[in-house]
Image: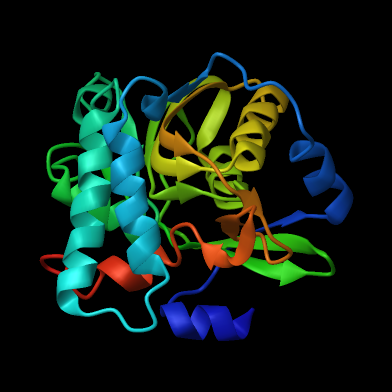
Amino acid sequence: METYERNHGTRFTHLLRFDPQVLESLHAPGELPGSVRVASDQHPGVVERMAVVTAVANLPEQQAAHRRRYLRALLDIYGMLPVRVADAASVPGTVVVAPEREGRILAELLGVLPRHQGWTPQAKRMPAAGGLLVGVDHRLPARSDRLVVVDGVVASGVTLMAVMHLTARPGAAVDVFTCHATAEGALALARYAERREVALTLHVGHLSGVLDERFYSVDPEDRATLLLGDIGDTISPVAPGT
């Protein structure tokens, strides 16, 4: 854990463990609830942008032009979501949480953080005895009744589950916005929210891929192909002000 803290220049003040049995139940196959809203079901342009993202993620070497195309594709996907994140964030009493790094970068570029009360915690997952440990630092709000969470991808879902656990009161309304999710990650978020008595809506650009043994989102036909790679590593060199 100390290595993760050192690499990200922070100290984790909260640790949440998800053991293998818990993850297995959260990620079990099932029917997606109506609270998971997938933009690509109605907007084929999302799939085109995801193809750009996947192509750049798997390049052996990424130039600045590639990174800018990747970032532009992510922002385009946000623009195709049925609900605008800025509209959700502008509801009175809303607290915006945008985890470092991609959540914070996307939220800033989408104009969400400058106008609203926002929090940008480090929330990092770490392998732990076949399961996952999530470390979250102190940059979190008090528990809230209404949250908007901005992120880039939901793979396993554990970092956002940790954010919900720490920031949402029972009965809270939580809107999660993201470009991509695996079915396992979307189901896990929905199930976890139900257990926490949180009213979750997941606004996602596209749903595809599977989790590999490292809990990364990969192509089920070729598990060596990452669907998004590390979004923060990819976009931070070309994001304004980063």
Task: Classify residue 236 by image quadrant.
Answer: bottom left
Where does residue 36 sit, x and y in percent of width and height?
Answer: 52, 23
In the rendered view, would you say 203 is above or below 151? above
Locate the C terminus by quadrant: bottom left
User: Residue at 38% of width from left, 29% of height from top?
Assistant: 40
Left or right, 210 with reference to 208: right
Locate the N terminus by quadrant: bottom right
Q: Report the colour scheme.
A: rainbow
Instruction: Please say whether residue 14 is visible from this viewpoint.
Output: no
Left or right, 42 with reference to 198: left
Where does residue 183 sit, x and y in percent of width and height?
Answer: 62, 37
Task: Classify residue 93 by image quadrant.
Answer: top left
User: Residue at 61% of width from left, 17% of height from top?
Assistant: 33
Q: In this figure, what is the number of numbered marks?
A: 0
Task: Classify residue 134 by image quadrant.
Answer: bottom right
Where does residue 21 sit, x and y in percent of width and height?
Answer: 88, 48
In the rendered view, would you say 42 is above or below 144? above
Q: Nearer the viewer, residue 229 or 203?
A: 229
Left or right, 38 with reference to 13: left
Q: Nearer the viewer, residue 174 or 13?
A: 174
